[in-house]
Amino acid sequence: MNMLLHHVLYLLLHVASGSQYGTETIETLMPNVKVVKVDLRSFTETQVPLLCGDSYQDTEVIWMKDSEREGHGNQIKVKVEEMMGANYSCHNAAGDYLNHTLVLVQDIPSPNRTRRVLEKSHDTDENEYIRCLAKNYNGTFHCFWKKTKYRTSAVVALVQVGQFSGRNFSCFVHSDGAGLTCEDLDSCSFAEEVSRIDLTVYFRSNYLLEDYTVTPFYIREIVKTDKIHITKVEGNTFQWEYPATWSLPRSYYPLTFQVKVVHARDSCDSEKQVLLKETKETKLTVVHSSKKYRFCLRAKDELVDCPWCQWTHYEVKHKYKKH
């Protein structure tokens, strides 16, 4: 992963240190990054203290903001107005780089406040911005989000996962910037989960910072199999297999399958089904008088209350025999 500052992914436990300045709180989010947490409805400006480094107390230090000189001395204060954060770098008298501090601004969230970076998920009625799913019980899960049209260039600045559960995770952001994958390094698929997974993702858009926290979850609550592959069709008899990504052995991780038959012109989500049944078998013969229909199939963990996978469908078009 490209380790540019705004893409740095810290997965260690994090405890923010902060100080109060009037109605603003200044926190250290991670090394070299300070966050001014404010109510942007009333915030105008504040002073943010910067330190080049303890080892530069006796060094002539010059601070730069972009290419302009901002001040001098090992410790200075800079003015931050509205959402106008900046990247400040400190140098010695010869112009050599010594250190830097990125200052970001975060609007304090509230129930009625509009979020700027991510859109709400349209697949649920809940107040959900990030959706996480697992294909099996091996400890790996995937999370997805959609950025608003005004913040498509926003990037993930920090991921905090397992902070409160004590579990050890390794995560990476997808190349398209629209999701991430995390792996539980201590996972044992046969062991009972004793603590939920906590996850917070921080997004940076220019100098604006927003964080989104996912409701803590167990893997078993978000497990969702890959689509089922229909392997054989003979007349009105259908055969299928467990997804290759599903946990083994099958006897320990059984699936239940839902079969739906609808009219050929209808989708699998139609409520006008001709047939709807659940089965543990991987083969089924449809008894249906019509020569044209749509066979729909999906699956879920038999033993856990979890979501169904996406529908797989096969359109049957038997030819009428001439007499």
Image (cartoon, rainbow, N blue to C red):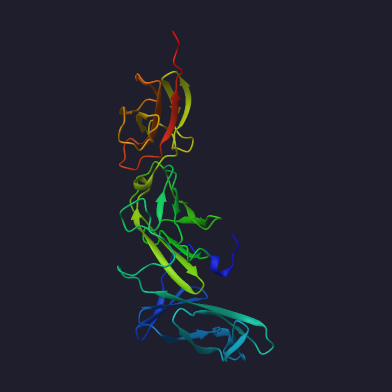
As drawn, the residue found furthest toward the front would be 323
- Quadrant assignment, res 210: bottom left
Q: Which quarter of the figure is the N terminus placed in? A: bottom right
As drawn, the residue found furthest toward the top would be 323
The front one of 131 and 171 is 131
Q: How many marks?
A: 0
Is residue 306 left or right of 9 when viewed as pictured? Answer: left
- Quadrant assignment, res 252: top left
The residue at the point 59 percent across, 65 percent down is 3
Q: Which quarter of the figure is the C terminus placed in? A: top left
- Residue 259, given in percent of the width and then of the height, sits at 35, 29
When the figure is inspected, residue 284 is found, relative to residue 160, above or below; the finding is: above
Q: Is residue 253 visible?
A: no
- Residue 79, given in percent of the width and then of the height, sits at 48, 87
- Residue 303, given in percent of the width and then of the height, sits at 31, 37
When the figure is inspected, residue 238 is found, relative to residue 167, above or below; the finding is: above
- Quadrant assignment, res 215: bottom left
As drawn, the residue found furthest toward the right would be 94
The front one of 319 and 214 is 319
Q: Is residue 4 visible?
A: yes
When the figure is inspected, residue 49 is found, relative to residue 287, above or below; the finding is: below
- Residue 22, given in percent of the width and then of the height, sits at 35, 86
